[in-house]
Image: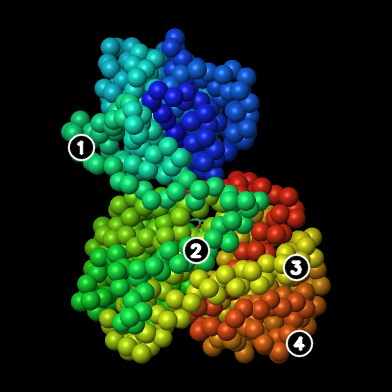
Amino acid sequence: MCGIVGYVGDQQCAPILLDGLKRLEYRGYDSAGTAIYDGAGIDVRRAVGKLRNLEKAIDEAKPQGSVGIGHTRWATHGRPSEVNAHPHLIGDVAVVHNGIIENHLALRARLVERGATITSDTDTEIVAHLIDQRVREGADIEAAVRGALGEVRGAYALAVLSAKEPDRLVVAKSASPLVLGLGEGEAFCGSDIPALLPYTRDMIFLEDGEMAVLERGKATITTLAGAAVERAPQRIDWSPVMAEKAGFKHFMLKEIHEQPRAMEDTLRGRLDRENGDIHGLEIGLSDEDARGIERVYLLACGTSYHAAMTGRYLIERLAKVPATVEIASEFRGRDPIIGPGDLVVAVSQSGETLDTLIAAKEAKSRGAKVLAIVNVIGSAIPRAADAAFYTHAGPEIGVASTKCFTTQLANLLMFSVWLGRRRGALDADQTRALVEDMARLPHLMRDVLLGTRQLVANLAKRYNEARDVLFLGRGMSFPIALEGALKLKEISYVHAEGYAAGEMKHGPIALIDSSVPVLVLCPKDPWYERTLSNLQEAKAREAMVIAIATEGDEEVRDVAHDLVEIPEVRTELTPFLTVLPLQLYSYYVADFKGTDVDQPRNLAKTVTVE
Ligand code: F6R
């Protein structure tokens, strides 16, 4: 789970590599390095810790050259240290790698037997040795990489530089992301689109089992077996500014505030207000297919799993199709009974989460149709799926997902309405009313963000010393309670639990005392009365109760210590609004604590390991 970047052109490449690594730092940040051909050989700089340490090393050494590779690391094999940092330089060959080589121990033993000296604990150094051996035997760098990859098993995105052929980079991909970029007289590679955006919008997505030779203005793609692959670049319409902080203190805060815009972009062209219907969904299903679906399986991890849980409520409520939701990593291990007739919806921001990817592939191999709800275009999950229904949130840089969560909800809602209409569960009037209400979402979200921001910041300040926090919700607010707790845990390191409000009396109530803030989601919805009783139970145990409730709810105002109001909306829209104060709450608690909000400890944005 690392970030890689590469450049071949005529500009000095150190600043380009550093800039790309900065945009990739969210993928890993325990060490970083560059390898640059300086006219005589390969200059390698590596530093442990955040990228600024590498920046300092490069600033001092000032490596000159216009072909190079860079890496930011999130340790999987070997602890974070300079010797384990990438690039690994063996002989004339420098390698950066994202992924895990599964058979590295066997390969290591064989190399050692043949006399190789291996200095790091990484699987990547093994690959560098395998390539270097072939180069020493006379192979050109492309053939050497191809030959070496014939020996390795596992996941990789690799970029390789050889001092013997310093006018090119060789890259390869299997199960880890890699994007190529083409410019005038230059070529790039990177782990994702934002790393390359300031330099080019013309990108090529390498597929698994492919490699490419990058030269000035050119990418020559082949399969690992050597067959030529023709693939034209795609034009990416994300602007570089979309990937910057735009004046906010953290990416997370910026992304929280971007949600109305992200919602507009995601709904655009899909709400048919003229005919009161949903249209233009890239879901690869005909109306007849919609009627034939027997069951929907939603698979995801983390925050995307909470969106999927909400999706289950939406699909069952609006389309009247049985829906099951499952954590992707649990799905594959239990030999699931799934097949034709089932539709699997794989939900993922990155489109690269390995657990979700494997689960989707497994479902597909059993005959189910797979629909991907994903943010990153051309990523692995949509490529493995039958169809891709993209959220248009733009790049999400903060490790804690916010705008991608609400846009996932939007796609799940649009899909549920589309399905409900086609299956006759919704009539024309119901569908029209839903479409009209959805069109108001960006505006409502903007109002909630602006209207609650200061109040929530004050609450976060007041309760930021709490060691434990509970989040309660019922029905569609239950996944939102889980999401509120996850956000708080991951960025502020405060222990938080989300519970179905009705479960509280079955155990968690024992945790409650006057030191525990309890955030209760109790909008006016079908679960309201019962949630209110749970709120009162928490209050009776002296908890500090913060209610997220519907505007004008005097009953809640009387009971709760603090009240955050959201506008009255139909039940299906409440999660879009109730989650916003929870995102702000976790953000402000973390900011008061001074944690690294955008790059919390131990976490990475994209989890490409099992
Ligand atoms: C939490 C968070 C993670 C991701 C999870 C799945 O804020 O972002 O829990 O939701 O790692 O990632 P994706 O959505 O990329 O599959």
Q: Amino acid at mark 3?
A: Leu
Task: Check disc 2: other Cα within 10 Å, few if <14, some if 14-19, many if 20+.
Answer: some
Instruction: Say what secondary structure mark 3 lies in.
Output: helix
Residue 217 makes an appearance in the image: yes
Q: State how far apart marks 3 and 2 are (Cα).
A: 26 Å
Q: Amino acid at mark 1?
A: Val
The quarter of the displayed image where residue 489 is located? bottom right
Q: State how far apart marks 2 and 4 are (Cα).
A: 35 Å
Q: Toward the viewer: 226 or 299?
A: 226
Task: Check disc 1: other Cα within 10 Å, few if <14, some if 14-19, many if 20+.
Answer: few
Q: State how far apart marks 3 and 4 are (Cα).
A: 18 Å
Residue at which label 1 appears: 229
Task: Check disc 3: other Cα within 10 Å, few if <14, some if 14-19, many if 20+.
Answer: some
Q: Amino acid at mark 4?
A: Asp
From the top left corner, tell me how far across and down residue 533 is, in percent: 67, 87
The quarter of the displayed image where residue 592 is located? bottom right
Q: Is mark 2 within 8 Å of ligand 1?
A: no
Residue at which label 3 appears: 459
| Residue positioned most to the top | 40
Q: Toward the viewer: 36 or 175?
A: 36
Q: Earlier in the sequence, mark 3 or mark 2?
A: 2
Instruction: Say what secondary structure mark 1 lies in.
Output: strand
Q: Is mark 3 within 8 Å of ligand 1?
A: no
Residue at which label 2 appears: 261
Q: State how far apart marks 1 and 2 are (Cα).
A: 38 Å
Q: Residue at x 23, y 41 (%)?
A: 231
Q: Amino acid at mark 2?
A: Arg
Residue at which label 4 appears: 558
Q: Residue at x 43, y 21 (%)?
A: 66
